[in-house]
Image (cartoon, coloured by chain):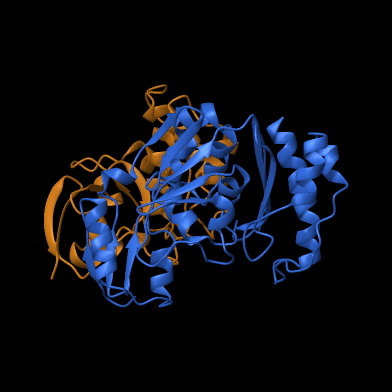
Chain colours: A blue, B orange
Amino acid sequence: MYDFEYHKPGSLADAVKLLSADPDSKPISGGQTLLPALKHRLNKPTSVIDLSGIAELKGVRREGDKLVIGALAKHVEVATSPEVKAAIPALAQMASTIGDTQVRNRGTIGGSVANNDPAADYPSAVLGLNATIVTDKRRIAADDFFQGMFTTALEPGELLVAIEFPVPEKAGYAKMRNPASRYVMAGAFVAKTGGGVRVAINGAGPGVFRQAEMEKALAANWSPDAVAGVKQSADGLNSDIHGSAEYRAHLVTVMAKRAVAAAG
Amino acid sequence: MPQVTLTVNGKTNTVEVEGRTLLVELLREKLRLTGTHVGCDTSQCGACVVHVDGESVKACTILALQANGSQVTTIEGLAKPDGTLHPMQEAFREYHALQCGFCTPGMVMSAIDLVQKHPDGLSEKEIREGLEGNLCRCTGYHNIVKAIAAAQDVMHGRAQTLAPAAE
């Protein structure tokens, strides 16, 4: 790892100031992705800005028909939070399956969503639940936020503050993990809300995406059988040593079925 | 150089570090607490697990500066000053839960966190799942799981002494 300066600002305003003063700086929260990347020298920040002391980024709370989760909420907090379990049990369940215990004790929802790893779990919950990303500057709809592999609508120096999840009527998540790495080969997050049905697919493609045909099928008939007949096209899906695009396309339908069954 | 002040196994230390210094490097190279191992250095194997403010973390994937002000417990901090082993250490010995011993410090630290988080007790399946972040390449995990199952009864006061391993 190359060396860098370390700063730990006490407020959001100070963090934004530090990040905008140095275009080669990087924010860090749990560091479960950034530190491995720095060890591989995939990145050479001049300074690392530790967000963990910023109160504005913390907390999990219910606000009317929304669940608001601060960017610094660790996976273990989301997995065990009574508010999350009561409002969106599928989200708590998802958080309990990210990485391993030690990763969940450090990694944060803000870090995962801002990083947008194609094999990450949270992006499909954010997209599937039609969540809103709140930054220090603006509010971004999930449909506009995720822009493909490791790419989001966040601008340089812009910080993810919280995620607002509309509380759904029903939601479920299912994933197939690579048996060795435990990363997602294909995952599906399904949600039934007052605004309609949404299906978000992670792990299978270069970025999280919505599956319109499955959404239509589930809107007409909310049952695992309704998606069983919907074939995902293999075009554009990931193909690597872990599985072909065709295999992943097949998994998408299987995971969607399981997610609907899990949602009940 | 920046300074880190942290309490390790009850003793407060102030150490000069670089920005990039990892907690495990501080523990092993600055404080000479070499019981915490580095296996993969990619946060997969769990040989480096320590407790930071009571939570098990991989010390190879946290900066020393991120641990500033925290309470750290390493494998060296488990036994009593008179040498009496922690029930989990005793169980690993009794159940022969190690061969080469490389993964053992991390296994023990993860196991203690796992047991502490489950006061109602863990099934064999839950113990196996709870060890997802720790890899052992010798024993095939069976004796590790048995040791943790036995140690939890002592740790939660359901047994006065460790159940002896079968002959």
From the image, which quarter does the C terminus of chain A lie in?
Answer: top right
Residue A153, position in %: x, y?
49, 62
**Image quadrant assignment for residue A63:** top left
Above or below A125: residue A116: below
Q: Is residue B147 visible?
A: yes
Residue A204, position in %: x, y?
69, 60
From the image, which quarter does the N terminus of chain A lie in?
Answer: bottom left
Viewer-side residue, B36 vs A166: A166
Above or below A62: residue B21: below
Q: Is residue B64 visible?
A: no
Residue at point 43%, 55% (across, down)? A111
Q: Does A212 sit left or right of B109 as displayed?
A: right
Residue at point 78%, 34% (across, down)? A222
Residue B137, position in %: x, y?
54, 60
Viewer-side residue, A109 vs B55: A109
Q: Does A137 sit left or right of A248 as displayed?
A: left
Viewer-side residue, A102 vs B122: A102
Residue at point 26%, 73% (across, down)? A4
Viewer-side residue, B84 vs A86: A86
**Image quadrant assignment for residue B138:** bottom right
**Image quadrant assignment for residue B55:** top left
